Image: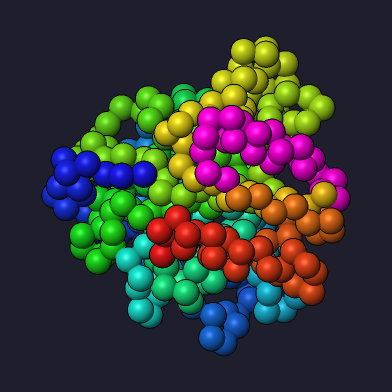
Amino acid sequence: MKLDRRSALLAGLATPLAAAAQTSPPALADKPVPAGLPEPSETIDLWPKGVPGRPARLPVETVIERSSEAQLADRAVSGIANPRLVVFRPRIANGASVLIMPGGGYVRVVIDREGYEMARWFAARGFTAYVLFYRLPGDGWAAGPDTALSDAQRAMRLIRARAGRDGLNPEKVGAIGFSAGGHLCADLATRFAADTYKPVDAADKLGAQPFVAAPIYPVISMTAPIAHAGSREQLIGKDAPPALEAAHSPDRNVTKATPPCFLVHAEDDGTVPVENSLLFRAALRAAGVPVETHLFTAGGHGFGLRRAAGKPAEVWPELFLSWAQTQGFG
């Protein structure tokens, strides 16, 4: 993906959001932060002039701690009413950045296993990492199935708008997502230019196309029996017609403008069938879009970093990094 001169200029001129008075990330409750693990350095609210399409009754943000281990967090956040980015900065930046979209079946956002842990991994390798707290489509927002996508588009544009201030390359912004967040990542990669909200400031003149995209064990198809039933119901409704299924199945929306993609899935995934990644891969190849695909015999679903440890699948982040470098990312 190349930014033209006009977009690059706008990236330099767009007014960055101030770091002050932003929504704080969820606390760790009674769990201490393990020694040596950095917490986010900054939070960026996506919509400074008000979140668009508010429902009559705003959802109430709720954080559930699911880990039974004393120093290992596994928080799931639901009812996100103020979408935002939390930022993990590297000690020495390489100029590239990555937008991370955790999974959660579109009913929650799993911020530790598929958010903060990945952000720390990227930051340790020189990338500036942004974890997206996106709104959920079942909470009554006017954008409906495009609610999370509008947050992802806005996040990409804000990262680029702040690039000059943060010493980053506005072109080299990648995207990675897991499970339902993988659907969001693939949706962003295929519908980055979709008109999902009205522009609110200069940042919205910038592009939302990722430089590279990595949907990891992603929900892709909205058509049974391949569709993940829970994500499908939250996104488009239980009785959605075929036309709505097609509109929100990223494999149906691939074009030549879709950025290069990196796919990972386990053959024994009992939650999101591996056929989701295979469908997306086939569509990318048909459109002539570069795609790297890694399928592991075992790994199940939601392995991220911690659950892949000790299994062949644990190599996937390094495989991504090696591939991304061949694409000029990082």
- Residue 204: which quarter of the image? top left
Picture quarter with the N terminus: top left
| Number of on-image labels | 0
Q: What stretch is highlighted in magenta?
A: 268-291
Going by the image, does 204 lie left or right of 317?
Answer: left
Q: Residue at x 32, y 66 (%)?
A: 95
Q: State the image coordinates of residue 153 (x, y, percent, origin top left).
A: 40, 39
In the picture shown, does residue 324 fall above or below 236?
Answer: below
Q: Is residue 196 magenta?
A: no
- Residue at image coords 86%, 50%: 268
Left or right relative to 134: residue 192: left
Image color mode: rainbow
Q: Residue at x 63, y 76 (%)?
A: 31
Nearer to us in this view, 249 or 86: 249
Q: Is residue 214 above or below residue 324?
A: above
Residue 52 or 166: which is nearer the viewer? 166
Please provide percent x and percent y for residue 200: 25, 35
**Would you say 298 lies left or right of 53 here?**
right
Specify the quadrant of the image occupied by residue 59: top right
Asked if residue 111 shows in the view, the reply is yes
